[in-house]
Image (cartoon, grey):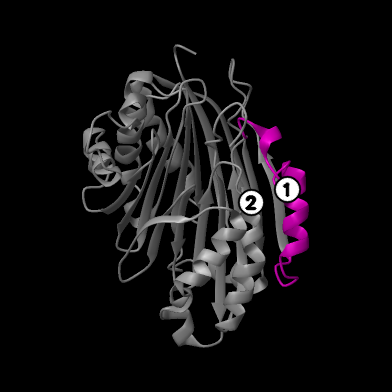
């Protein structure tokens, strides 16, 4: 907990694994990690599991600070507050090796912290994070790049810059570049600050006897319209006391997640989802619904895809989703990362800014 308030901006880590045994690669893989091992990894990060759900493709955990997704050969961990996310890497590499899986790709992303001085090692600065990653990742991840994708100082806010670190081995780099590789997906990471105060109040628990956290979470999901973002998703939600909200949605191979810190003065919400480039048109509809739920004063959208023709499409769909809501684009940055592909990072503010 930061002295001035809770740090909503998340740190996100994605680790890709591969192995020589096809059954381990396409089968249950990392999903066979025992829950005690998951708890061990999260203890190093300094968070815990509060709820979980799974399907035939992956497992999704709501954490005390954000989310964890475990696929057979991929782990995505997203944590907020003063968690030490990068400390999970050595443990996950070690447990992967025990299963015959080795690390072949890493991507670390985050926004600019609201309370940077409250962050512990190795998150005291992006330089410190990069040094830690460089020293921790195995030598086979030889294609590496670190970059801060800047936005202009947005009036009173300079929080929305995007920090990216990417590393890959030769095999993963070649695999991701194949024209019809099944990993041609997009990932959309959205950060929102200065939430509409009336809408943010929906993420405070109501006073009254008999109020239960599980009931409060379901009420928030329905009352805010979060359940309508993807009606096909199975939602696992959690309401914090006295305020705050997290959810994971699972729909086949794809996930979505929302985290809300609604307090005045440092209100923050995030939305993330992934999807196939075959259905990229859903971005416009989904992003429009998300923006209407929170009505942020400032919003950043980072779109990541290995698909080489995605930049103009992403810009078009995002512009079409946000302009009718009074959100104007203030900056746009595009960069390339090994095995990650293109990242298109855009920032938007309302006219009231």
Q: Which mark is residue 109?
A: none
- Residue 178 higher or lower than 25, as above or below: above
Q: Note whether residue 107 is visible.
A: no
x and y percentages locating residue 319 in the rendered image: 41, 30
Quarter of the figure with the N terminus: top right
Range of residues picked out in magenta: 113-142
Residue contact between numbered discs 1 and 2, judged by CB atoms under 8 Å: yes
**Against 108, is 313 above or below?**
above
Q: Is residue 151 above or below residue 222?
A: above
Residue positioned 64% across, 75% down in the render: 94
**In the shown orientation, is residue 192 left or right of residue 236?**
right
Is 329 displayed left or right of 115 in the figure?
A: left
Q: Earlier in the sequence, mark 1 or mark 2?
A: 2
x%, y% of residue 299? 47, 29
Dot 1, crowdedness within 10 Å: few (<14), some or many (≥20)? some
Tag 2 secondary structure: loop
Query: What residue is disc 2 on?
Result: 84
Nearer the observer, 188 or 120:
120
Residue 19, percent across and down? 56, 82
Q: Is residue 270 visible?
A: yes
Q: Residues within 10 Å of mark 2 (few under 14, many from 20)?
A: many
Identify the residue at image location x=58%, y=76%: 96
Q: Which residue is mark 1?
A: 121
Residue 269 falls in image quadrant: top left
Q: Based on the displayed image, in which of its 4 quarters is residue 213 positioned?
A: top left
Give the distance between the C-alpha atoms of the residues marked 1 and 2, in whole angstroms. 7 Å
Task: Let me know if residue 150 is in the magenta part.
Answer: no
Q: Position of residue 122 (x, y in %)?
A: 72, 49
């Amino acid at each position: 907990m930061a002295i001035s308030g809770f740090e909503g901006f998340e740190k996100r880590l994605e680790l890709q694994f591969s192995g020589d045994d096809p059954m381990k690669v396409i089968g249950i893989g990392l999903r066979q990690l025992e829950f005690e091992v998951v708890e061990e990894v999260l203890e190093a990060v300094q968070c815990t599991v509060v709820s979980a759900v799974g399907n035939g493709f992956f497992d999704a955990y709501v954490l005390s600070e954000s989310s964890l997704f475990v696929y057979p050969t991929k782990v995505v961990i997203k944590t907020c507050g003063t968690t030490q996310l990068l400390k999970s890497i050595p443990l996950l590499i070690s447990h992967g090796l025990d299963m015959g899986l080795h690390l072949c790709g890493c991507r670390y992303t985050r926004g600019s912290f609201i309370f940077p001085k409250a962050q512990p090692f190795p998150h005291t600065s992006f330089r410190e994070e990069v040094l830690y990653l460089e020293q921790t990742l195995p030598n086979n991840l030889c294609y590496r790049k670190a970059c801060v994708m800047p936005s202009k100082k947005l009036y009173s806010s300079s929080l929305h810059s995007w920090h990216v670190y990417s590393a890959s081995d030769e095999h993963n780099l070649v695999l991701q570049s194949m024209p019809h590789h099944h990993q041609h997906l997009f990932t959309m990471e959205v950060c929102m600050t200065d939430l509409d105060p009336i809408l943010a109040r929906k993420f405070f628990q109501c006073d009254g006897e008999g109020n239960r956290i599980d009931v409060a979470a379901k009420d928030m999901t329905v009352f805010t319209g979060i359940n309508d973002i993807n009606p096909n998703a199975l939602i696992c939600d959690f309401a914090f006391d006295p305020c705050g909200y997290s959810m994971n949605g699972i729909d086949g191979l794809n996930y979505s997640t929302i985290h809300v810190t609604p307090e005045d003065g440092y209100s923050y919400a995030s939305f993330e989802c992934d999807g196939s480039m075959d259905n990229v048109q859903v971005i416009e509809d989904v992003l429009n619904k998300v923006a209407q739920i929170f009505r942020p004063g400032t919003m950043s959208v980072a779109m990541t895809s290995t698909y080489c023709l995605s930049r103009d499409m992403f810009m078009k769909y995002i512009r079409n989703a946000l302009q009718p809501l009074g959100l104007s684009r203030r900056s746009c940055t595009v960069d390339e990362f090994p095995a990650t592909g293109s990242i298109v990072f855009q920032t938007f503010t309302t006219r009231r800014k």
